[in-house]
Amino acid sequence: MSTGDQKTCNPQTGKAPAQKAQQAAADRLSRALRVNLHRRKAQARARKSTETVADKAK
């Protein structure tokens, strides 16, 4: 491997810096979507339990 190759490719991961940045962005998006889904499910469960309590009060 020449010195020029080491600048463009990380020998441990085999990925160029641009690929690593793209993968990091995809990982951040994936995590954000997962957190959003968990939050929405929790909100739906909270609404459902509130409706159930209101129905029992009638």
Image: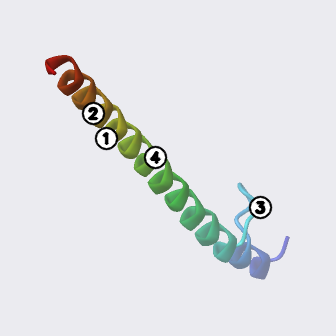
Is residue 42 shown above or below 27?
above
Q: Does the CB distance between marks 2 and 1 fall below 8 Å?
A: yes
Q: Does the CB distance between marks 3 and 2 fall below 8 Å?
A: no
Is residue 30 shown above or below 57?
below
Q: Amino acid at mark 2?
A: Ala
Q: Earlier in the sequence, mark 4 or mark 3?
A: 3
Mark 3 Cα shell of 10 Å, populated few (<14), some (14-19), many (≥20): few
Give the alpha-carbon distance from disc 3 to disc 2, as whole Å.
Answer: 46 Å
Considering every residue shown, the one lying at the far bottom of the view is 4
Query: At numbered mark 4, what does the secondary structure look like: helix, strand or loop?
Result: helix
For mark 1, what is the residue? 43
Task: Tell me which residue sits at (59%, 71%) in the image.
Answer: 21
For mark 3, what is the residue? 14
Q: Where is residue 36 drawn, in percent x and y? A: 41, 51
Task: Tell me which residue sits at (26%, 30%) in the image.
Answer: 51
Q: Which mark is residue 23?
A: none
Considering every residue shown, the one lying at the far front of the view is 58
Give the alpha-carbon distance from disc 4 to disc 3, as whole Å.
Answer: 33 Å
For mark 4, what is the residue? 37
Q: Does the CB distance between marks 2 and 4 fall below 8 Å?
A: no
Q: Amino acid at mark 3?
A: Gly
Mark 2 Cα shell of 10 Å, populated few (<14), some (14-19), many (≥20): few
Q: Amino acid at mark 1?
A: Gln
Q: Earlier in the sequence, mark 1 or mark 3?
A: 3
Give the alpha-carbon distance from disc 1 to disc 4, as whole Å.
Answer: 10 Å
